[in-house]
Amino acid sequence: MVTSHDKNHFKMTKNVSITEFNELSTDEKAWYLWHGAAFLHVYEKDKYRINLFHLNNYYIELWYHIEGNQVETIRAFTSTELLAPFLENINIDCVLH
């Protein structure tokens, strides 16, 4: 059930800046991911599953510790250089053949 509180928060997903997003608590960042961000890709590195999302005009990484079964960090960024690990892990063989 969507509450009026949820509806108000969802409206804010279009307006939250990258600076505001990075200042939120982990729980608040997760709320924005689940209620407005677009999931783009995931890959595993060491003991982490790293998820990439897009919200407004920035990207968001969610680092999930597999063994610890917990979110370690969520951070937003705009640098395309930080997308490199995700691009290295995308398999496009099916579109090349």
Image (cartoon, grey):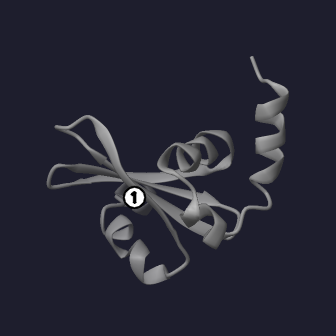
The answer to whether 9 appears left or right of 62 in the picture is right
**Residue 71, horizontal then vertical, whole percent:** 35, 44
**Residue 52, horizontal then vertical, whole percent:** 46, 57
**Residue at 79%, 57% in the rendered image:** 14
Residue 70 or residue 56, whichever sits in front: 70
Residue 8 occupies which quadrant of the picture?
top right
**Residue at 42%, 73% in the rendered image:** 83
The answer to whether 14 appears left or right of 26 in the picture is right
Quarter of the picture containing the N terminus is top right
Residue 24 occupies which quadrant of the picture?
bottom right
**Residue 38, horizontal then vertical, whole percent:** 61, 50
The answer to whether 28 appears left or right of 84 in the picture is right
**Residue 70, horizontal then vertical, whole percent:** 31, 39
Q: Mark 1 sits on what residue?
A: 97
Residue 82 or residue 71, whichever sits in front: 71
Quarter of the picture containing the C terminus is bottom left
Residue 88 or residue 61, whichever sits in front: 61
Q: Dot 1 surroundings within 10 Å: few (below 14), some, or many (20 or more)? A: few
- Residue type at tag 1: His
Above or below — where is 31 with respect to 14?
Answer: above
**Residue at 53%, 44% in the rendered image:** 30
**Residue at 32%, 69% in the rendered image:** 85
